Amino acid sequence: MAVKKTGAATKLILKVQTGTDKKGLPTYGQRMVQNVNPALGDEDFLAIGKSLGGLQSHTLKDVMRQDAAALTEE
């Protein structure tokens, strides 16, 4: 049985250090860009994430990719 993938959606998530807590440990926040082209390669995705991270006032910790799609049987 074939499986069909529909409704692909991709998000670019930037994890940034927003400060420190009372113990001096880093605290983090996220910046999210939705509706990214799911066909974008991982290398390009990382390059875009790093470029966007450089525009932030906070330090970039991680660039994350989140893909979601519905799977149905044909």
Image (spheres, rainbow, N blue to C red):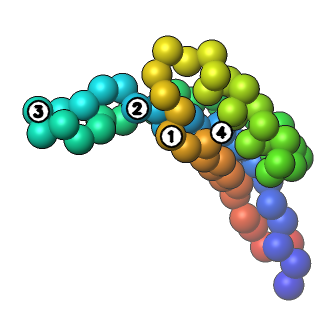
Q: Nearer the viewer, mark 4 or mark 3?
A: 3
User: Mark 4 — residue?
Assistant: 11
Where is residue 2 shown, x and y percent of the image? 87, 78
Task: Give, as a three-letter code, the residue at label 1.
Answer: Lys
For this rendering, which residue is in front, 12 or 56? Answer: 56
Q: Is residue 51 visible?
A: yes
Give the label on residue 9, or none.
none
Residue at the bottom extreme of this rendering: 1
For marks 3 and 1, give the CA distance.
20 Å
Query: What kind of element bears circle 1?
Result: strand
Task: Give, as a three-letter code, the residue at label 3.
Answer: Lys
Query: What kind of element bears circle 2?
Result: strand
User: Mark 1 — residue?
Assistant: 61
Residue at x 65%, y 37% (from the top left corner) = 12
For this rendering, which residue is in front, 41 or 10? Answer: 41
User: Mark 2 — residue?
Assistant: 17
- Between discs 4 and 3, the one toward the N terminus: 4
The answer to whether the residues at label 1 and label 2 have Cβ atoms under 8 Å apart is: yes
Give the label on residue 22, or none.
3
- Between discs 1 and 2, the one toward the N terminus: 2
The answer to whether the residues at label 3 and label 2 have Cβ atoms under 8 Å apart is: no
The answer to whether the residues at label 3 and label 1 have Cβ atoms under 8 Å apart is: no
Q: Quadrant of residue 3?
A: bottom right
- Between discs 3 and 1, the one toward the N terminus: 3
- Between discs 3 and 2, the one toward the N terminus: 2
Query: What kind of element bears circle 3?
Result: loop
Task: Give, as a three-letter code, the residue at label 4.
Answer: Lys
Q: Is residue 35 visible?
A: no
